Amino acid sequence: MEITLRSYQEEVVQTALKRENSIIWLPTGGGKTRAAVYVAKRHLETTANAKVAVLVNKVHLVDQHFAKEFNPYLGNRYRIKAISGDSGDKDLFGCLVKDSDLVICTAQILENALNSTEEEKHVDLSDFTLLVIDECHHTQKESVYNKIMGRYVEKKVRKEGKLPQVLGLTASPGTGGNKSLDKAVEHVLQVCANLDSVIVSTKDYTPALKEVVPRPRKQYDIVERRATDPFGDHLKSMMSMIHEFMPSTVSRSLRDMGTQEYEADVVELEKAGVIKENRLIAQCALHLRKYNDALLIHDTVRMVDAFNVLDEFYSSRKNKLLDGTDFFLQGVFDENRMELKQLASDARFENPKLAQLQLTLLEEFREKTSRGIIFSKTRRGTHCLYDWVNTNHELLKVNITAGILTGTGNGADHMNQCEQKSTIAWFRQGIYNLLISTSVAEEGLDIPECNLVVRYGLLTNEIAQQQASGRARAENSVYSVVAEEGGRELRRELTNEYLESLTSKAIDQVQRMSPREFRLKISELQKISVLIRIEAERKKDERKQRYSPAQVQLQCRGCFLHVCSGEDIRKIENSHHVNINPEFKRHYKTGGQVFLEKTFEDWEPGRVISCSKCGKDWGLEIKFKKVAILPCLKIKNFSLNTPRGKVPCKFWKDVEFQVTEFDFMDFMSSRFPDLDLDD
């Protein structure tokens, strides 16, 4: 199939065709991927021993880019392979790269291969001649993209070896949250430095671009705050009872209930309780966070959704009460449960945002065939909105059929890749005409042109706002913001409008820099980045050596029970942390079987495990090589007792001792001491 580019696409690929690193900046729907296919084709045609890697940041984009863009245009002449975390052949990545002209993969697959010491998996950056980085505005801070490009920049600064050409694609590099032009320019320059690229956009064909990507009509659907809110008030009165149960100095330090700031406060309070081994404070903080979640849900969707969050939480804890704190907290909910339930069913006090959302949907769907997307902040929120749509008689009358789209994962509200594909396919075919989605549909997803895009209860940045609005591509489409008058969502949306225009000004200023001035600035930023990276690695290594494994004890974060030593922990594939001490089994109980969509080379999931004393979730058992059953631990559910005191850790990478690699032969030999396996 022949590739034809629009005039503005031809303009923005010129820098890449000269074999120079560049970032293509075009709005959502502007055809960035098609431009990248064209560059890849020309590169493969004109480069000796060409090898192209197309990197994406979400699993579903691997298959999409393969099926919709690269394979139709290049597949008849070149060997193309799509590889993601769900691909069974990802473990042969190095071999697949050798046998392909172009690979499309998630950035994490490439990062793993760069780190791997196994010949079948390992690759070097120098194995490629062109790197295409989709949604390249993510190339900053600790992102996988930036880990890959951090290596690239360090090799460039050190003048080590040959490096591939880089082509970045983005709808917006953003301002990094900066509100002044100077700081926004610095942010754009930093993104350019991270990608070692200039940023290019259309100058001569802006009218043609606007014709292809029309802006939707934006409307603010503003609602007044509830005049009275007995359900919310009752939740807050229950939280106040918990405040009074805690020391007064603690409760006075907490900010307004029902806000993100309050959530941050109780997260820190729980950590402080764990460090002091004060179970009263730690457990009260955990429960207050759940009440705050309910308030945030109450502010976004229905009262019954907020009630259900708490009801499910307390139902799951009824048989795990350990001490007076647990009995008090359970009692507060149990004694107020019926009153809360009654308040949640009183339609007079329902969320006014839902009434406005209903009007917006009816206006769009009543008299014409429409297709729409509602963007919601959380997975839970999408499920609540889905239930609301499917029980709303007025919406059903206008034949709205809704589907949910959320990110992949293993949790209750996650989707697997097959479910994602089915939902998107049914939306394309019109089986669903309304998609209720988290941010997963904002970036890159090839979905049909929509008449209506609604941002509902969202607090996101200007990049997400631009990408969401870019989904409303049909003629006379509407981009609706449903928000409370004077509320946080409205303030953020207005701020994002300003930041969107600031991004354009910042890019324009960067593009007007002389080539020499730009190169000097980029070189300076890259040298600083390399120094920061080297120092961060040094500190990381230093932190890992702070204690010997024998000096660190793991305690259950729920009841502070000492359960094992750091000496008992081993790591598998640098990601699974298991306990090899057979005595550990007496500290936990097993639950239901874990089922994962993916299959893995050496292991399979077993049953969930939890603390036998307090019921705290600890992780799951895994079966390694079909024979070794090993408890695999989530470090966030433990605290570490070190010579300098207690330390709660969110990730295993943050622990302050060196974890040894798991040795299967050594482990099995210890189980069969009479069997001589030595050479």
Image (cartoon, rainbow, N blue to C red):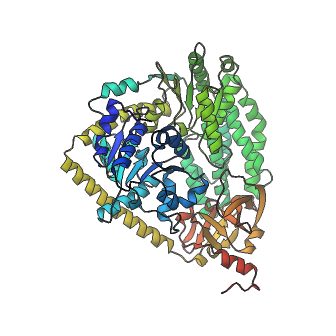
Can you give x and y, in whole percent of width and height, for residue 492 in the image? 45, 34
Residue farthest toward the front in the current orientation of the protein: 77
Quadrant the N terminus occupies:
top left
Residue 202 located left or right of residue 53: left
Residue visible at 60% across and 70% down in the picture: 641
Residue visible at 72% across and 80% down in the picture: 670
Can you give x and y, in whole percent of width and height, for residue 653 in the image? 53, 64
Q: Is residue 171 visible?
A: no
Q: Is residue 413 visible?
A: yes
Residue visible at 23% across and 49% down in the picture: 518
* Number of numbered discs overlaid on the protein picture: 0
Can you give x and y, in whole percent of width and height, for residue 247 in the image? 62, 54
Q: Which of 86 and 368 is in front in this view?
A: 86
Q: Which of 658 and 55 is in front in this view?
A: 55
Can you give x and y, in whole percent of width and height, for residue 355 in the image? 61, 22
Q: Which of 534 and 24 is in front in this view?
A: 24
Say if 208 sits above or below 140 in the image. Answer: above
Residue 415 located left or right of residue 64: right
Q: Which of 605 and 190 is in front in this view?
A: 605
